[in-house]
Image (cartoon, rainbow, N blue to C red):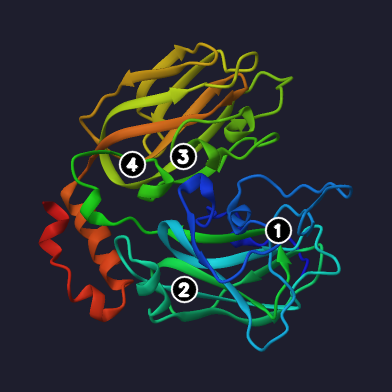
Amino acid sequence: MTGPQLDFRALPNVAGRALGSAVLWTNDEFFADVHSLISATAATHDPTLFHTRGKAYDGWETRRRRESGHDAVIIRLGTPALIRGVNIDTAFFKGNFPPFASVEGTTLLGYPSVAELLDADWVTLLDRTALEGDTANVFATSGADQLITHLRLSIYPDGGVARFRAYGEVQPDPRFLGGRVDVAATTNGGRIAGCSNMFYSSPANVLAPGRANVMSDGWETARRRDEANDWLVVELAAPARLHSAVIDTSRFVGNAPGTAQLSDAVSGRVLLARTPLSADTEHRFRLDSTAEVSQVRLDIFPDGGISRLRLLGEIVPAAREKVGQRWLSLLPSELAGQIDPSSFFD
């Protein structure tokens, strides 16, 4: 179905390669590589390109079924999350898209084998639903609030899907939030709470893992023609005492901001005074770490782009305990019962 921009599409795509997702299994990828499903870029199409098995598509395409059954793929999420919606994008698949699809999720911590995944208990997030060809088929998901670590996309009976996106609320594992961590990172539960401008690319990119590969893998604003400046606000994974920051302008050569400032978005207290930035550079700064912070505002002057923002600090014990209790409540009961809450503070 094609519809308006739904609220859940502002959430991170936790099934994307940019956050570390991976395709772990499929029963068939005869015509087109299943790993293309989670590519960060939009699908492309060359109508003249063929290979030895037929027409070349940028996506996942299975052979025509001549027996009962259906095709499926299992994806490990880059970070566990509550899944709120999906996009089953059939771009350029017109006479060969699957007429129906469903999505299920399961919760297996660590690094389960394919055999364990195939034998897991799966919960339905999207019932078998009709698809349209050459369309971004966007659906809200249903089901109980369960932390999902893996998704299974099933298509009925066969066909091609260009891209698969799953939008979710990240819930970090509290056992990995001890010591000094990046409390702004998407994979740790950080998120963008506000932004002045995202004309060229989304501010959510700056919280992604790793270094930017290209300029569009960061946040870039339009050129300002007034006296104001651009900004974004990050909701931290949990209240923390900040130690240092990284403001990375890598890939921004002629359009990096001239200066930047960091402040507590709630109190207005300055954490990093307005400081000059260099183009195409990873800048590291010490911050005032005496007070707890829950939201950080980055101001750039007057406009431009940055590729990554890191905010390193220690989550205060009470906040970490709260994160831990929330995380346990979202696990299947039999799995939650196997975890010692004291491990949150090891």
Which label lies toward us, 3 or 1?
1
SS at mark 2? Answer: strand
Q: Which residue is mark 4?
A: 183
Label 2: few (<14), some or many (≥20) within 10 Å? many
Q: Earlier in the sequence, mark 3 or mark 1?
A: 1
Report the amino acid beneath label 4: Val
Depicted 148 relative to depicted 260: above or below: below
Name the image quarter holding residue 27.
bottom right
- Distance from the alpha carbon under mark 4 to that under mark 2: 27 Å
Residue 185 image position (x, y, % from top left) = 40, 42
Which label lies toward us, 4 or 2?
2
Label 1: few (<14), some or many (≥20) within 10 Å? many
- Distance from the alpha carbon under mark 1 to that under mark 4: 33 Å
Residue 173 image position (x, y, % from top left) = 29, 57
In front: 218, or 295? 218
- Distance from the alpha carbon under mark 1 to that under mark 2: 20 Å
